Image (cartoon, coloured by chain):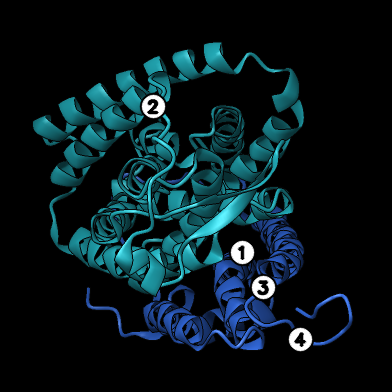
Chain colours: A blue, B cyan
Amino acid sequence: MTGADGRPAVGGRVDDKSVEIFLGKLLRWGVLLAALVVFVGGVWFLSESYDVPQNYKTFRGEPTELRAVPLIVHQAITLRPLGLIQFGLLLLIATPVARVLFSVLGFGLERDWMYVVITLLVLALLIYTLTSRSST
Amino acid sequence: MNTLEFTLLITLGSFLAGMLGSLTGLGGGVVIVPLLTLLFGVDIRYAIGASLVSVIATSSGAAAAYLREGYSNMRVGMFLEIATTVGAVSGAFLAGYLHTSIIAIVFGVVLLYSAYTSTHTLADPPEGMGPDRIATLLRLDSSYPTSDGLKPYHVRNVPLGFGLMYVAGVLSGLLGIGSGAVKVLAMDQAMKIPFKVSTTTSNFMIGVTAAASAGIYLRRGYIDPGLAMPVMLGVLAGALVGAKILPGAKVRTLRMVFGVVIAALAMEMIFQGVRGKL
């Protein structure tokens, strides 16, 4: 995000790259963390209900506590196995969102205001999808 | 089948899908939905929800490897991401109203197209074209590293590329896939972006687009933790193994085999959709 001499670089493609390498690492750690949470929740879920017959043929839809973001977090904190898996999936969905968020900062440091606005627009759309009321 | 057996089988199937997807560059998402619906009889809405999750996992997981190469064009990606996220939102809403048989048929058609592109190499865009007014205005032109040093390129046909990206987003939201084939079509063929740049930029975009759709699917209750868990872990592990063995793999043969498998799955999706069985 800064040039070799430590000052913020303006509009340099080289600096896009250092921002991107940082973001790439961030994404990989995010995915690994999400996978770990899903795995722990999954093992727990299976140890409790391994011999229950499964039925995914008929669509019922998930209960509210596995649909809304605050309720999923609550389910995970109170250590419900399915809530924990769902929280891990939420972390996974958050990794590209985090990348877009950091891109706003990256473009901001380059003083590329047009792209700060474009990236904020994408970020707003992503946040909308996670928080809007579901229609069906 | 009890939950343990079901989970283990789904993990194995997803592992193979992830490995083939990463070896062929098509992504695991395209085969997850047919695998779950045709083989395991899972409702297509649950299948799409689980597939979206695996698409995000492979996209974000591979980003570090792609980004180190330094090819991706963040401005192109972010500008086009407006079109794909709006498209993904439209597609995900559409999925709530369309009959599942229609979704299955559309899925089959898109799958056939993916099979076709996986076995046919598209011609590289012609070089040496001048700058484009809109691309210059949006500062989309850039350069990428080659063996002869940095090579500049001009981005063309921005409105057409933007429109195609909207379509890619709709398909992603409706079908739970990464729509990599349509994204590459938009960037390579319409916008004349060099192949290496479009592939890496597309990988980034796939994750963001799928996240937009996944948010809506989660809010709707289409993402089942018990099903998405083995799919996500299986595809991710498969993609990592695939990336490790890629250098020694016979990619051409694999692409042909995978192309045939995808085409067969596509026919079956269309057939079952027409019969109203999905």
Gap between marks 3 and 1 measured at Cα: 41 Å
Amino acid type of the residue tagged 2 in the rendering: Ala
Where, by quadrant of the figure, is residue B275 drawn? top left
Gap between marks 2 and 4 measured at Cα: 40 Å
Q: Are marks 4 and 3 on the same chain?
A: yes
- Per the image, label 1 sits on a secondary structure element best described as helix
Residue occupied by mark 3: A12
Which of the two discs, 3 and 1, sits closer to the camera?
A: 3
Q: Chain of mark 1?
A: A
- Residue A8: give its label: 4
**Category of crowding for the residue at label 4, using alpha-carbon neighbours closer than 10 angstroms: few (below 14), some (14–19), many (at least 20):** some
Left or right relative to B72: residue B183: left
Gap between marks 1 and 4 measured at Cα: 41 Å
- Identify which residue is drawn at 76% across, 62% down: A25
- Identify which residue is drawn at 66% across, 60% down: A38
For the residue pair B201 and A76, the one nearer the viewer reads as B201
Residue occupied by mark 1: A85
Q: Are marks 2 and 3 on the same chain?
A: no
Left or right relative to B269: residue B77: right
